[in-house]
Image: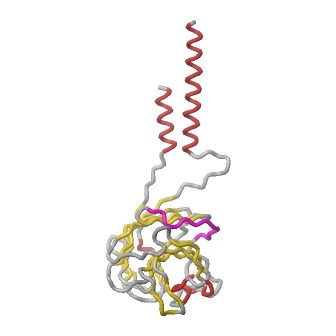
Amino acid sequence: MFRTGLAVSAALLMAAPAFAAPVDLSDWTQEGGGNWVLSADRNSVEQTWNVVPGVFYGPGNAQGKKLSGTIKVNTSSDDDMIGFVLGYDAGEINAGPGGADFLLIDWKQYDQGGFYGGTAKAGLAISHVTRGLTDDAGAWLHNPDFGVTELARGATLGSTGWVDYQEYSFDLEFTASNVKVYVNGILELDVDGSFTDGAFGFYNYSQQNVIYAGIREDVLPPDPTPGVPEPATWAMLILGFGAVGLSARRRRAVRASN
């Protein structure tokens, strides 16, 4: 009975079931360029225009949460930017220098030069944005002089673009000190820093017919407090204490029978 109780306690402590809730996008907000068309089930949206940067973002604070879903470019026309914003506040896409403070995760299909004195690189990247996003060298080239400073590129997709009509799954984990981005289950971005809170949203720049779908949200476990064991550690401690107690009782039983 004692061992059975330990096993149950350990299982309860070590298990951390996640019940991600579907996200209703009907109360999300559009800013900047784009035409964001909500699906009938309100859980997906398609951006249909080829225009200047735009965002479609949710209410409240996304820090401390995991956001998941799929993304697909549903056309063979153009090769530009799709992605996400984190820590976004209303109006920041139109802010002046120093008037914004959010993270941009963008993914371009192919290298493309000929604009703003440089080449927009294919691949997945994360950048820190400190001014509005418009059709300029900031959004196009990740030029820090225009308020977009690149922080990292994807582990396997840093120079690899998305494929037409291919659906990708994504998972984003956003805390005050870390951002993780998974694409098709592979950890592509893992960036530490000090990040302001704000909303999660979709980002689009000069790429039409992009579908963001099946969006789900879950609360991340809190960061472990220094010196306080995590649940798995507690489970191991309980099992260890139980084994010590059981061994002591067996020794007492042996001595009593002698």
Residue 103 drawn at (x, y percent): 56, 74
Q: Quadrant of residue 91?
A: bottom right
Task: In the displayed orientation, state which residue is furthest to the right.
Answer: 227
Q: Quadrant of the C terminus?
A: top right
Residue 125 higher or lower than 251, as above or below: below
Report the front residue among 232 and 96.
232
Report the front residue among 82 and 123.
123
Residue 19 higher or lower than 112, as above or below: above
Residue in the picture at 33% in, 74% down = 39
Residue 5 drawn at (x, y percent): 49, 31
Q: Seen in the image, is 187 located left or right of residue 128?
A: left
Q: Provide the residue span drawn in magenta.
A: 186-197
All told, the count of numbered labels is 0
Q: Seen in the image, is 184 located left or right of residue 238?
A: left
Residue 134 located within the stretch drawn in magenta: no
Residue in the picture at 50% in, 67% down = 155
Task: In the displayed orientation, state which residue is furthest to the top.
Answer: 258
Residue 231 drawn at (x, y percent): 56, 45
The colour scheme used to paint the residues is secondary structure
Residue 196 drawn at (x, y percent): 62, 71
Residue 253 higher or lower than 175, as above or below: above
Residue in the picture at 45% in, 50% down = 17
Residue 175 higher or lower than 246, as above or below: below
